[in-house]
Image: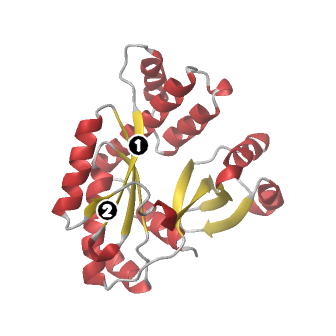
C-alpha cells in the first residue's frame, strides 16, 4: 500500500465527529463556491468542476438543500469571492508541509497559518521551497457496494488508472491517476454511470522521512491544527507512515 493511501485510510477510519463533519461541510461549500464563481455556471451538466464538488458534498452526506443553497449563494454577484492559495513550510524535524487554502480574507488566512506553524515549532517558507518534493495526482474513491471492480477494472485502466487500492474494511476502492488524466477518469466514470464518493487532486511526496513516534507526534500536532482551520482545504506532508506510528495512532483512538 502506498504511503499516501495509508494516511488517507487512517483518517477515514477515525470516523467523523459533529465538529469534523461541520468542517467537511464548510470545505465542500467552498469547493462549490469556487467552481461556480470561476465558471459563472450553476448547472453541473455544464460545469465539470461543479459536478466533482457536488459529488464530494454527497460523499460527506451533505443534504441536497444545503448543496442547492450553496450554488444559489455562489451565483449571487454580491456574495464574497473565494480565493485559492497555498503555503509551504517545514514542521519540526524538517518535514515538508504544503497547505492548500480557500478564503474570503487573505490577511486572516496568512496570519492564522503562520501562527500555527510558529506555535508548533515549524516555520513558513518561500514559494517553491517544498513544492518540488510532491507530485500531483488525481484520486477517486469508489464505493465497493455500488461497483463491481472485476467488471470495471479494464475500463478504469483505459481511463488512466495508475494504481487501484482496495480496502474491504472501508468498502472503498481508491483510484490514482496522473494529474493530466483527472478529466479523462472523470469522463470515464460518467460514461460508466459511476459517482465517486470523493474526487480530488493530491500532492504525493516523491520521498518520505521516517521519525520516531515522539518526534512524529509533534509533526502531527501541526498537521491537525492546520486541518482544523476553517480556511484550510488540504494539508500534504512527507512524513512516512511507519507501522510503529500507525499502531500508536490506532491506540490513541
Q: Residue 223, which numbered label?
A: 2
Label 1's element?
A: strand
First of labels 2, 1 by sequence position:
1
- Which residue occupies 61% across, 61% down? 174
Q: Residues within 10 Å of mark 2 (few under 14, many from 20)?
A: many
Question: Gap in Å between the C-alphas at discs 2 and 1?
Answer: 17 Å
Q: On the image, which quarter does residue 153 sit in?
A: bottom right
Residue plotted at (64% across, 33% down): 48
Residue on which the image places disc 1: 85
Label 2 sits on a secondary structure element that is helix
Q: Quadrant of residue 226?
A: bottom left
Q: Residues within 10 Å of mark 1 (few under 14, many from 20)?
A: some
Q: What residue is at 43 percent from the left and 84 percent from the top?
A: 243
Mark 2 in CB contact with mark 1 (< 8 angstroms): no
Seen in the image, is 238 located left or right of residue 223?
Answer: right
Task: State the residue in front, 61 or 137.
Answer: 137
Q: The C terminus appears in which quarter of the rendering?
A: bottom left
Amino acid at each position: 500500500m502506498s504511503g499516501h493511501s495509508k494516511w488517507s485510510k487512517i483518517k477515514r477510519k477515525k470516523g467523523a465527529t459533529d465538529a469534523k463533519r461541520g468542517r467537511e461541510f464548510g470545505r465542500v461549500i467552498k469547493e462549490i463556491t469556487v467552481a461556480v464563481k470561476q465558471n459563472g455556471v450553476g448547472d453541473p451538466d455544464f460545469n465539470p468542476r461543479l459536478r466533482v464538488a457536488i459529488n464530494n458534498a454527497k460523499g460527506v452526506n451533505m443534504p441536497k438543500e444545503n448543496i442547492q443553497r450553496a450554488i444559489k449563494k455562489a451565483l449571487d454577484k454580491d456574495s464574497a469571492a473565494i480565493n485559492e492559495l497555498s503555503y509551504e513550510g517545514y514542521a519540526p524535524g524538517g518535514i515538508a508541509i504544503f497547505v492548500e487554502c480557500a478564503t474570503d480574507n487573505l490577511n486572516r488566512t496568512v496570519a492564522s497559518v503562520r501562527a500555527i506553524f510558529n506555535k508548533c515549532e515549524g516555520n513558513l517558507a518561500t514559494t517553491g521551497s517544498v513544492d518540488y518534493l510532491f507530485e500531483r495526482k488525481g484520486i477517486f474513491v469508489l464505493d465497493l457496494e455500488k461497483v463491481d471492480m472485476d467488471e470495471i477494472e479494464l475500463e478504469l485502466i483505459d481511463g488512466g488508472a495508475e494504481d487501484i487500492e482496495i480496502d474491504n474494511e472501508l468498502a472503498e476502492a481508491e483510484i490514482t491517476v496522473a494529474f493530466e488524466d483527472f478529466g479523462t477518469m472523470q469522463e470515464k466514470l460518467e460514461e460508466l454511470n459511476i459517482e465517486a464518493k470523493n474526487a480530488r487532486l493530491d500532492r504525493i511526496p516523491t520521498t518520505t522521512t521516517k521519525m520516531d513516534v515522539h518526534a512524529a507526534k509533534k509533526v502531527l500536532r501541526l498537521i491537525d491544527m492546520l486541518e482544523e482551520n476553517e480556511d484550510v482545504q488540504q494539508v500534504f506532508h512527507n512524513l512516512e507512515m511507519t507501522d510503529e506510528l500507525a499502531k500508536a495512532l490506532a491506540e490513541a483512538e
